[in-house]
Amino acid sequence: MRAVRRARFPLLLLMLGLSGVAHASDADDLASALRQARTLAARGTAEVSVYFPPRAASTPGPTRTADRLPVVPFRPALINQHFTVTRADAPPVAGRDVTRFDLTPKVGQAACWTLWVDRAWNVPLAFEERGADGTLARRAVFTRVNPRPVRINRLVPPVPAGLRAAVLAALPGLRLPPGFMPTGISARENGGLKVTLGDGANVLALVLAPRNVRAAPGVASRRVGDSFVWLVGNLPDGPLRAALADIRAVDGGRLGTFVRENGSKE
């Protein structure tokens, strides 16, 4: 009898271990939906509201109607590194059953995200971005969806090897905001370069320009020699300015091999 019990005990441990391996985490399930969204997407009627950056009183209202959700270059691998992901039940969106995923940054003061994912199609039907203080920055939600999703081909370019080192060499003293890393570089039509910084969900623009930019919420800039460096995005003023405060020089020539063609997108 003891021999039988001894034989069963390792088997029980093995079964428990295998069940733990097979169980996907909340972050894994969200990553699956975000990858699915590169090849499958809902269509219908969506309300898209953008509150950041703040608009002048004379500009159109923040809400428009579209037949799809705006494209956000989510990077599941970076989300897994930089965010805590938790799931919860949620009321239906556009009459369809969904799961809610909340993304909270592990470090820094980056914006938080919430996504509502269709349980059958495994693609987002709504998302929401809120600043570190909880202020709503943007929201997109389907109010009606077509009976079937459509096939798409949406690419998110891989992060070039060596890009981070090149950016830090071109801008000595730059302090990347916590959780952010360079993901791409493009040339600007008005001169200079735009370095895209991302944490998997949020995107900042680090701009090397021949001219300064007007002060505004979500914008920090400083002059370095004959150039100007801007950092633009949904971060509090303190972290934006801290990132640029110690830059000692600007050498955009170091970044030439990483520059994408104008018009290419994240």
Image (cartoon, rainbow, N blue to C red):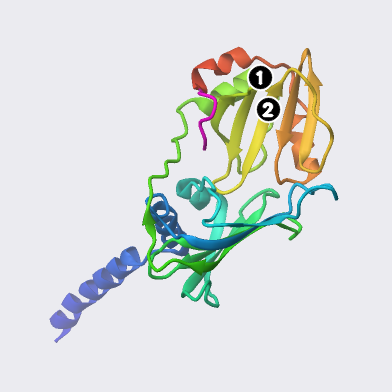
- Amino acid at dot 1: Gly
Q: Main secondary structure of the magenta part?
A: loop
Label 1 to label 2: alpha-carbon separation: 7 Å
- Amino acid at dot 2: Val
Name the side, left or right, on which 78 lies relative to 236. Answer: left
Report the span colored magenta.
260-266
Element at badge 2? strand
Residue 108 image position (x, y, % from top left)? 68, 48
In the image, 151 versus 113, the foreground residue is 151
Please say whether residue 59 is visible from this viewpoint: yes
Element at badge 1? loop
Name the side, left or right, on which 46 lies relative to 52. Answer: left
Q: Quadrant of the N terminus?
A: bottom left
Give the residue pinned by disc 1: 192
Q: Classify residue 220 by image quadrant.
A: top right
Q: Could you classify mark 2 by the number of other residues whose Cα lies within 10 Å: few (under 14), some (14-19), or many (20 or more)?
A: many
Q: Residue at x 31, y 65 (%)?
A: 22
Give the residue pinned by disc 2: 207
In the image, 48 versus 159, the foreground residue is 48
Determine contact: label 1, label 2, CB under 8 Å.
yes
In the image, 90 versus 152, the foreground residue is 152
Q: Residue at x 42, y 44 (%)?
A: 154
Residue 261 image position (x, y, % from top left)? 51, 23
